[in-house]
Amino acid sequence: MGGGRMSYDDPGRAAPGESSSAIPAALLENVFDDPAHGEPGRDRLVVHLVWETLLLVALAAGTYLLWQEAPDTLRGDGLRDLLTDVVVLGLLTLAAGLSLRAATVNLAIGPVAVAAALHMAEQGDRGLTAAGGPALAVATLGGLVLALVVVVLHVPAWAAGLAGAAGVVVYVEQRTGAVLPQGTYDPERDALPLFAGFAAVAVLGGVFGAVRAVRRMVGRFRPVVDPARRRGVVAALVAVGAIVGSTVLAMLAGLLLGTAGADPVTPGTGLDWTVLAVGTSLLAGTSAYGRRGGIFGTLLAVSLVTVVLAYADARGWTVDRWALGAVTLGIGLVVTRVVEAYGRPASAPERLPATDGRISTGWTVPRADPPATWPPAMPERSAEEPVDPWDVSRWETGPRRWDTEDR
C-alpha cells in the first residue's frame, strides 16, 4: 500500500512517531448511548458504596445496642420473629424500589398489602395456595390496569397510584373491625429461608441494576427533557413490568401479615406502609428520580429500620410507622440529592477533538487544500462606463487578428 501500512493498534493510541490525536476511549465506549434516553456514560457507583458502608456501620451499632437491651431478640424465637419482620418490610421496600428505579413510583403498595393481609386472615383456613391464588390474580390484574393508565395516558405514576390506592381503601373499609388470622401456616417456621430468599433477590437485583445496559433500560421511563414526552415502546414495557411487579411484591408482603402467628389485621388506609417502604428505599440509595441505586443498600436499610423498631419496642418507646416513615423519607431525599450529584456519569467532551486527519486505524487521510481563486468570467467595469451588450471586445482576452495592420 505504497509507503504506509495498516495499524491494528489500540484506537486510543497513536502510531509510533506520530502525534496522539486518536478518538478517546471514553467517546468510543459511549458512542452507542442515545442522549435522548439519559446522559451518555457509566454511572459512578462509588457514592453508593460509601453510603452503604455508612449503613453497615449504623446497622452494626444498632444491633449491638439491641443485643445490650434485649439479647433474646437475637436468638431463638425472637430472632425468627425479627427475620420475618425483615422479610415483610423487605418485600414492600423491594416493591417501592422496583417502581422507583423505573421512575414509576407505585404509591398503592401499602393499601394493597393491607387488603392482601385482610384477605389472607379471612381465607387462610382454606390453605395458603387456595387463599393466595386469587390474591395473586387480582394483584396482577390490578397492577396491569394501573400500568396501562400510566403508560397509555402517559400521566405521573404517583398520581395514578394514589387513585389506585383510593380504590383499594374502599375495599378495605368494608370491614368494621380487626380480623384474627384463620390460617395454620406460620411463616416464622421458615424465617431463615424466607430471609435468605429476600436477601438474594435484593442483592442480585442490585448487581444486575449496576450493569450499564440494564441500568439504562430500567430507568428509560425517566424524563430527560419534557416530562410529558413519551419515552418509547421499550420504556413503556419496562414501566408496565415495574408497576405490575411492585403490586405483586406488595401482595406477597400482605399475605405474610395475615398468616398465623401475626397480630390481628386492622383495617386502615395502608399509606403508612407506603411512606415507610418508599422512605426505606430512598434510604437504601435509590434515587427518587429513577434509574440510579446501589447494590447492598436495600438489604442494609431494611435490616437497619427493623432493628430500630425492635430496639424501640425493647425500650418501651412508642414509634409510629408514620413517624419512622417521615424520618426515613427525609433522610432519603438528602441521599437522593447526593446520589444524583455524585453518581451521574463523568462529563464527556460533547464533540470530537480536533485532529490532523489521522483516524484510529493508523491510516493518514490528507486534508483537501482550499480551492484556488478563479479569475472572474468577465472583466470588471466601472459604474461610469456604459455597457454595450454588442461590444465583442468585452468577451475577448487577446488582440483580434483581423484588426491588425497587415490585413
Image: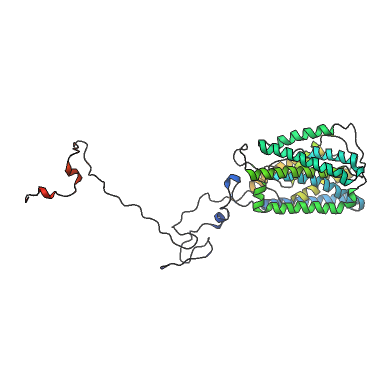
Which of 327 and 389 lies nearest the eye of the viewer? 389
Q: Position of residue 347 (x, y in %)?
A: 57, 50
Residue at x-position 76% and y-position 46%:
94
What is the basis of the colouring in this image? Answer: rainbow
Identify the image quadrant of residue 160: top right
Residue at 78% x, 54% y: name it. 200
From the viewer's perspective, tell me whether residue 36 is left or right of residue 5: right
Residue 66 in view (yes/no): yes
Find residue 103 and report its horizontal and vertical position in percent.
68, 42
Q: Residue 114 in the image: state x and y as whole percent.
A: 83, 38
Which residue is located at x 70 percent, y 36 percent?
149
* Residue displayed at 86% across by 54% down: 192
Q: Quadrant location of residue 102?
A: top right
Asked whether residue 307 is in view, the answer is: no
Relative to 13, 251 lies left or right: right
How many tags in the picture?
0
Q: Is residue 288 left or right of residue 134?
A: left
Does residue 9 sit above or below 177 in this rendering? below
Q: Is residue 164 above or below residue 293?
A: above
Q: Residue 369 placed where, x, y %?
A: 36, 55
Q: Quadrant of the N terminus?
A: bottom left
